Amino acid sequence: MTSKPRISACAGAVWLCTWLLLAVFNVSAQDTNRFIFLCFGQSNMEGFPGVVEQDKGPVDERFQLLAAIDFPKQGRTKGNWYTAVPPLCRPSSGLGPADYFGRTLVSNLPPRIKVGIVNVAVAGCKIELFDKENFQAYAATAPNWMTNIIHAYGGNPYQHLVEMARLAQKDGVIRGILLHQGESNTNDKEWPGKVKAVYENLLHDLNLKAEDVPLLAGEVVNADQKGACASMNRIIDDLPLTIPTAHVVSSAGCACRPDHLHFTPEGYRELGRRYGQAMLSLLSVSVSGVPRSADGAGAYATSNYRNLFAEIGKSQSEIHQKIDSAFRQLFHGDPTNEAVYFEAGTNADGLLAFITDIKHHDVRTEGMSYGMNIAVQLNKKAEFDALWNWSKTYLYVSDANHPSYGFFTWQARTNGTRMSQFVAPDGEEYYVTALYMAAHRWGTGPGIYNYPEQAEQLLSRLRHRPVITGSVPWRGGNRPVKAGPLFDEEHKMVLFSPSDERSRFTDPSYHLPAFYELWSRWGPKEDAEFWSQAADVSRDYFVKVVNPTTGLNPCYGNFDGSIVARSGNYGTNFSYDAFRTAGNWSVDWSWWGKDKRERELSDKLQAFFESQGTNYGCVFTLDGKPLEARHAQGLVAVNAVTSLAASNPRSKQFVEELWNTPTPEGLERYYEGLLYMMGLLHCSGEFRIW
């Protein structure tokens, strides 16, 4: 009988020790401080052929490329790391978005962090070429020039990307995936699902988790550059609805070549920076100093924005049509009965435009800043810039001796003449957030269009602007006024007014904890803790200031939540300012998910309005006595937004009512219309953190 071979105890021990040593060696060889990013797509991800001198370097050696194929002219061998001097895809490609993506990361991340790129892209291809199961059918129809590229990747670009990624994983950790593709799938409504399949296959084949490896997808050449495939951007923009961990990078303002398909070098630089900025906001290494554990469980952490309209059965096409129709009416509709946005000539900084309160024949920082937030959410850069230009030209106070210096007077006539010398801080709050979002979505520009610089200056003043005493026009004469920052340092609360013509109190509807959380991450590092604490203070304040039975809040409140006794009926009752408060706490819950009391507040408030019938009024005492019977469309909109935090099934009826409510027109269309427009964006999941 033949005996089975045996491994001696000594040999077995040697074998086991060798295996353990190899295992330890392999683990220790993986550098957790080397962040790997996979890049795939078509020609814009490859990079248009040619590299201009300024893009050749010097490139920080912390930014590296794993050569996916041999680069004979550059002396690169497949599978080895090199400093990421373009081209990064193949020897014949050029500058692409991956270049300034990586440069942006290494210039912002701690010195210990290295960034590695793996780029496999094929000019002209459809997303189907990266379909793991069915790529052969598409490849068989490819023209000869594309076939040659496919052959460079061993006949299977997807598998080649996986093989190179596995090689890269030996040296680092995959932290994200970058996609730029869509031109060849223009108007393909199935594209998001096809991208999802590729993304999920990559996660599976590389043993990755979606929550650890987000997908960044860039828009194709934008409509503002007359992009040949710009209609595809609407489909690309909806990718997060299909892939919750996907994030879209705007191409607005990124210059293109005469073919209107490919970006210029400057366009690639800007697009790459935007990819980088988007990734920086997602990485668990905190550039802002705020740990990821503080990010809550809302959309900021998950990238999942609830679409309340989809939840009641509306299609994405219907939702987009409703949003587009409302924007067209309010911004570009009939000026006599529909529009609130009006162009007002030009100056050295370009187009000027204002949003006017039709009923009172004035312009307010409230409406201007709301309009800018609407514009950035809808990728309307021209309207955004025109509103900001008008604000800076007519509302901004540049006189260093004026009590409102560095801020915006809250009210003016449509010809720019100031009607007030004072500040309403909610306008500044919305201006700051709009400017930061514009910077993240569109990059930066010169002068007043240097969005991040403008945002940071204004945000710093909200807390730190010195107290100034000065003389201002007052009722036909002048009076001395003393004013300081817009937030009370001791209470960490926004003021109703920072000047001494009024006592110091707050407005519950000015409390915007969802914004303060962003400011703690995006703003000056020395103020991060203050803004984080301000968010928590506002959450506590909501609970203190609302009526415990009805959920209604007054328009004005003292810092302890009590009524401002001398503020008259308007300040002590639930009225127009107060509409907005529930929307503030509900968006905070949607974005951050940190305080479950906000859900209780939403349920309580909606229970009250349900008890008032379907045609409820708009002004009430805090215990629920109706004072004005008008069924206000703006309140309808905010009550629908309140459903973002509500837990009771009744919340759907408020969403249904907003859906069935027409876009406001006529005399009340300013306030009602802007709340309505923002309500549509919030309820559709289209008001996002850019």
Image: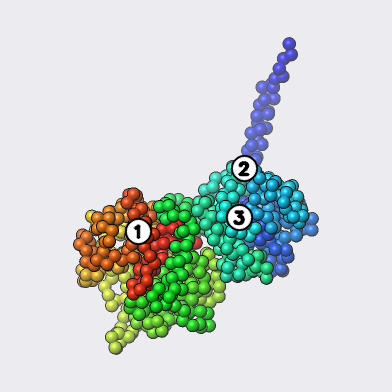
Q: Which of marks 3 and 1 is in front?
A: 1
Q: Nearer the viewer, residue 642 or 435?
A: 642
Task: Measure how far apart labels 3 and 1 are at the Cα level.
Answer: 40 Å
Judged left or right of residue 417, residue 164 is: right
Q: Nearer the viewer, residue 327 or 352?
A: 327
Task: Measure how far apart labels 2 and 1 are at the Cα level.
Answer: 46 Å
Residue visible at 31% across and 80% down in the picture? 481
Picture coordinates of residue 613 (x, y %)? Answer: 26, 57
Q: Which of 335 and 601 is in front in this view?
A: 335
Picture coordinates of residue 161 (x, y %)? Answer: 67, 48
Quadrant placement of the N terminus: top right
**One can see residue 176 in this view:** no
Q: Which of disc 1 and disc 3 is earlier in sequence? A: 3
- Element at badge 2? helix
Residue 657, disc:
1
Q: Which of 409 and 364 is in front in this view?
A: 364
Q: Marks 3 and 2: CB-CB under 8 Å?
A: no
Residue 178, disc:
3
Q: What residue type is labelled 3?
A: Leu
Picture coordinates of residue 569 (x, y %)? Answer: 21, 70
Q: What residue type is labelled 2?
A: Asp
